[in-house]
Amino acid sequence: MRLIKFVSLAAIATLSVGLWSTPALLHLPMAATPAQSDWISGWVDDLKNSNQRWILVDLSSQRLTAWEGDNPVYSVIISSGREGERTPTGVFWVQARYVSSRMQGEGYDIPDVPYAMYYDGNYAIHGTYWHNSFGTPVSNGCINVAVNHAEWLYNWSSMETAVVVRD
């Protein structure tokens, strides 16, 4: 039964760090192989069979959908990572949340990035006020959404909300 697989994998995927316990990142290479895509699809099936809130990011359609179990509750167009800065695929969990965050990297320094939800190191779903190119991969690897959509997602989600990113 898939739900049992999900529960056992979720239990296995927990790391203990000091007094805190956070889910591990189940990270895949930038371009998933067919076997890895099947693995991600298995997680999607498991999440749909649960009552959990979770986020699905489809890089090929540049769309993010918020789910509650098998019910899609919100869907928006995104901008993911551009060529050379691809958004990593895999199964992750929200690890940190900030109403406002400064994002810095090679060639960029953006203050006051709204509603940032970090799910894999420096990768986050966040509001974007500096471009309106949603539907086109233009970011440095993060998931860019319009600020009003980022606010909705931030208020709807919580720490450890599952984030599934697939091609």
Image: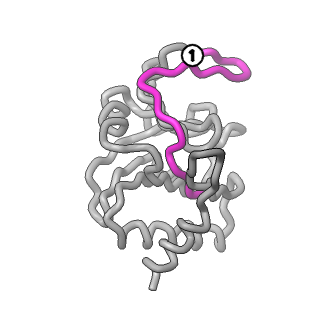
Q: Which residues are magenta?
A: 90-109
Magenta stretch encompasses residue 128: no
Q: Could you tell me which quadrant the C terminus lies in?
A: bottom right
Counting the numbered discs, the total is 1
Displayed quadrant of residue 137? top right
Q: Mark 1 Cα within 10 Å, few/some/many (few <14, many 20+)? A: few
Q: Is residue 73 left or right of residue 54?
A: left
Point out the residue furthest to the bottom here: 1
* Residue for badge 1: 110
| Point 42% across, 33% down: residue | 145
Task: Tell which of 12 and 76 is nearer to you.
Answer: 12
Q: Is residue 129 above or below residue 146?
A: above
Considering every residue shown, the one lying at the far front of the view is 19
Q: Residue at x 41, y 66 (%)?
A: 47
Is residue 100 found inside the magenta-colored segment of the image? yes
Question: In the image shown, does 67 or 96 lie closer to the viewer?
Answer: 96
| Image coordinates for residue 94, horizontal then vertical, percent | 50, 45
The secondary structure making up most of the magenta span is strand
Where is residue 124? Give x, y as percent: 54, 37
Seen at 48% across and 72% down, the residue is 7
